[in-house]
Amino acid sequence: MRPRFFIVAAALAPASSEAADAPTVQLALDGAADLSPVYPTVTIPANEHDFVVIFTYGDRQNHHIVTKFLPIDATGPFRITTEARAEAFPTPDGARFLMRQPFLTDIPLGRWTMTAEVDYKVVGSVEFKVVPPATALKLSSPVELMGSLS
């Protein structure tokens, strides 16, 4: 799927310094207030529908951003929303962007690649692995959580 959206970073002033050399792309379970990654990961459980894509770009202008999630060896049906939410945060070297683009179904197991494009130019990609969801902890009583007190 090729969800597309346009980020209008009107609150960001034009950059006064030279553009950064190379943006970085990360997957994380969420983003902090400054859009830095919270729990960066390259392994995602199949039932985790909400994670974020974070990358930096070397200016503070308005951009057309596209993210692509493509299976490498994963097979099976999946659906991803085409309406992603994006946020921008100024940095000394440009701007940090965070995209929330949830999967609407469980993600098929296997290896995937996520690519980010800014103004139709690839700025980075990251390979990640989708693993089976963790099984729920089964306890016979609350005492099992604490173990023996003796």
Image: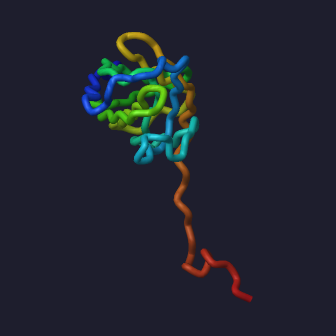
Q: Position of residue 74 (x, y in %)?
A: 52, 26
Q: Position of residue 20 (x, y in %)?
A: 51, 20
The structure residue drawn at horizontal position 47% and vertical position 44%, both measured from the top left corner, is: 29
Nearer to me, 72 or 24: 24
Q: What colour scheme was applied to this rendering of the protein? A: rainbow
- Pick the quarter of the image with the C terminus: bottom right
Residue 149 or residue 11, whichever sits in front:
11
Q: Quadrant of the N terminus?
A: top left
Q: Nearer the viewer, residue 144 or 29?
A: 29
Q: Is residue 83 shown left or right of residue 102?
A: left
* Residue 100, placed above or below residue 67: below
Q: In this view, which residue lies farthest toward the top?
A: 120
Residue name at image x 55 percent, y 66 percent: 138
* 2 or 143: nearer the viewer: 2
What residue sits 46% from the left and 21% below the top?
17
In percent of the image, x 54 and y 54: which residue is there? 135
Q: How many marks?
A: 0
Indicate left or right for 25 with 15 as reference: right
